[in-house]
Image (tube, rainbow, N blue to C red):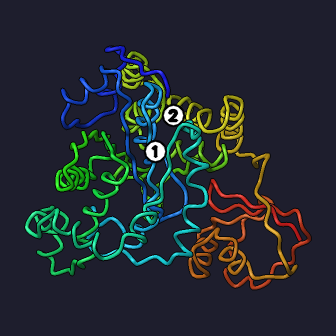
C-alpha cells in the first residue's frame, strides 16, 4: 500500500483548488488526515471516442488524491453507456451497440494514463456486475430511489414541461451509477457539477445497502472552445488529450480570452500566485494572444513533452503569423488521380458534405498549393501527388497517390 500523506496544507489544496463543492467537507478532511487509505471513485461512460480536457479536470483531481496515497478506482461504464447519462439532455440519447461502445473505449485507458499512474489504479467495467447479477439485483436496486425524487431533477422537469418523453431506463440511470459505488465500496466520488444529482444518489444507494455513504467532491465544468457550452464531443468544441501536439495547440488558441485564467487553473499546474500574475497581465492590456501561446505550450507539454510544446508553438507562429505551410502535414492516400474537388473535400472530412464543400469553394476558402480554387463547377482535378490542400486558415492535407 502507498504511503498516506496527511500534510494539512496539501490536503487543503486538494479540497479547495479547482473544487466547486464538497459533501461532507469536514468528514472528508478528517478522513484524509487519518492514516486510512480511501477509495476514490470516478466513472466515465464511453458514449464517444477519446477523453478530452473536460474529462481531465476530475482526472487531475484524482491524481492529487493518488499522490496523497489513496486508491483511485476508475469505472468504465460499458453497461451504463447503453442508456447514456440523461444529465443536461432534452431528449433521450441514441442507444449504442456493444460494437460502438467497444470502439469508443479503445483509447480511454491510454488517455487516462497521461494523467494517472495506471499501475496504481483499480479499473472496473460495470458490465462486470450488471450483466451477471440479473433481475433480482435490479429489483432490489429499484427500491433505493423514488419516482418523485428522480423526477425532481431539473433536466427531467424541463423535458416534462416541453412534452418530451423520459424513458424508464433513463430514470434508472442514477441508481445504476450509485450501484457502482456499492460494488467498489467507494469512500469518495468525484464528478463535474452537473453530476451532483447522480453523486448524491450514490449516497442514497449505499445507505439502502447499509454501507457508509461516500463523500462527494465536484469540479467546475470546463467550457469548450466556443466559450459557451461545456466541452463535448457531440458539440464539437472539445480538445482531445490524445490529439497530436499541433492539433492541441491550435485548438487551445481558439478559446475565448475570458477563459484563459480558468484553463490555467483547471488544466495546468500553475500556482495561485502565477494565475494572479496572469490576471494582472490581462488587466494591464497585454495581448491575450501572447498569454494563450504560453497556455497552449504548457498544455501540449503536459500531454506530450516540453519539447513538443515548444515545437508546436514554433509551428503555430509559422503557419498563422508568417502564413507558411506547416512542416508536418497529414497525408491522404488518393485511390484515383482524377476527382471533383467537392467530392475530395467531403471524402477527406475537410468539409461536412459535398454541399458544404461547394460553399467553401465558392467563398474562396479552398487552396491547392497556395492557389485559390473558387469554381464550384470545377468537376475534376488531376492530382500528381504531393499537392497541399488548404481549407480555411487551419486545415491542411497532403495528397499522396
Instruction: Return the residue nearer the eye: 126 or 275.
Output: 126
| Residue 159 x %, y % | 18, 73
Q: CA distance from mark 1 to mark 2?
A: 8 Å
| Residue 100 x %, y % | 54, 73
Residue 88 at least partly seen = no
Instruction: Return the residue nearer the eye: 27 or 95.
Output: 27
Residue 61 at least partly seen = yes
Q: According to the image, label 2 marks what residue?
A: 292
Q: According to the image, label 1 marks what residue?
A: 255
Is residue 22 shown above or below 255? Answer: above
Which quadrant does the C terminus fall into? bottom right
Instruction: Return the residue nearer the eye: 130 or 379.
Output: 130
Are there few (<14), some (14-19), or many (20+) residues within 10 Å of tag 1?
A: some
| Left or right: 319, with 239 as reference point | right
Report the residue at 46% width, 31% height from top. Answer: 66
State which quadrant residue 249 falls in: top right
Report the residue at 55% width, 61% height from top. Answer: 105
Instruction: Return the residue nearer the eye: 221 or 202.
Output: 202
Q: Are marks 1 and 2 in contact (CB under 8 Å)?
A: yes
Are there few (<14), some (14-19), or many (20+) residues within 10 Å of tag 2?
A: many
Which residue in the rendered view is the most extreme toward the left? 148
Question: Helix or strand or loop: what does disc 1 sit on?
Answer: loop
Report the residue at 37% width, 49% height from top. Answer: 184
Amino acid at each position: 500500500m502507498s504511503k498516506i500523506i496527511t500534510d494539512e496544507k496539501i490536503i487543503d489544496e486538494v479540497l479547495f483548488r479547482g473544487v466547486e463543492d464538497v459533501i461532507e467537507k469536514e468528514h472528508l478532511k478528517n478522513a484524509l488526515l487519518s492514516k486510512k487509505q480511501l477509495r476514490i471513485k470516478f466513472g466515465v461512460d464511453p458514449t464517444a471516442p477519446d477523453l478530452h480536457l473536460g474529462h481531465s479536470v476530475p482526472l487531475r483531481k484524482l491524481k492529487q488524491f493518488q499522490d496523497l496515497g489513496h486508491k483511485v478506482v476508475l469505472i468504465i461504464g460499458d453497461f451504463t453507456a447503453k442508456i447514456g447519462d440523461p444529465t443536461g439532455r432534452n431528449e433521450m440519447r441514441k442507444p449504442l451497440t456493444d460494437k460502438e461502445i467497444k470502439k469508443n473505449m479503445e483509447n480511454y485507458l491510454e488517455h487516462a494514463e497521461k494523467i494517472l499512474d495506471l499501475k496504481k489504479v483499480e479499473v472496473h467495467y460495470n458490465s462486470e456486475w450488471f450483466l451477471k447479477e440479473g433481475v433480482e439485483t435490479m429489483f432490489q436496486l429499484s427500491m433505493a430511489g423514488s419516482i418523485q425524487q428522480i423526477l425532481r431533477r431539473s433536466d427531467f422537469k424541463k423535458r416534462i414541461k416541453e412534452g418530451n418523453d423520459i424513458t424508464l431506463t433513463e430514470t434508472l440511470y442514477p441508481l445504476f451509477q450509485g450501484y457502482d459505488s456499492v460494488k467498489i465500496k467507494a469512500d469518495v466520488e468525484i464528478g463535474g457539477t452537473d453530476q451532483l444529482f447522480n453523486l448524491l444518489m450514490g449516497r442514497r444507494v449505499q445507505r439502502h445497502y447499509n454501507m457508509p455513504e461516500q463523500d462527494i467532491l465536484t469540479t467546475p465544468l470546463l467550457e469548450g472552445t466556443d466559450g459557451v457550452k461545456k466541452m463535448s464531443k457531440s458539440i464539437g468544441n472539445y480538445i482531445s488529450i490524445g490529439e497530436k501536439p499541433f492539433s492541441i495547440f491550435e485548438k487551445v488558441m481558439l478559446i475565448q480570452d475570458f477563459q484563459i485564467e480558468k484553463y490555467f487553473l483547471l488544466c495546468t499546474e500553475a500556482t495561485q500566485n502565477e494565475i494572479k500574475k496572469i490576471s494582472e497581465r490581462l488587466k494591464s492590456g497585454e495581448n491575450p494572444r501572447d498569454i494563450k501561446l504560453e497556455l497552449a505550450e504548457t498544455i501540449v507539454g503536459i500531454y506530450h513533452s516540453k519539447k513538443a510544446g515548444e515545437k508546436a508553438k514554433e509551428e503555430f507562429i509559422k503557419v498563422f503569423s508568417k502564413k507558411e505551410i506547416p512542416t508536418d502535414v497529414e497525408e491522404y492516400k488518393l485511390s484515383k488521380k482524377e476527382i471533383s474537388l467537392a467530392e475530395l473535400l467531403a471524402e477527406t472530412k475537410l468539409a461536412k458534405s459535398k454541399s458544404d464543400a461547394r460553399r467553401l469553394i465558392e467563398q474562396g476558402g479552398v487552396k491547392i498549393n497556395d492557389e485559390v480554387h473558387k469554381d464550384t463547377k470545377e468537376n475534376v482535378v488531376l492530382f500528381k501527388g504531393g499537392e497541399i490542400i488548404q481549407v480555411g486558415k487551419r486545415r491542411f492535407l497532403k495528397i499522396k497517390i
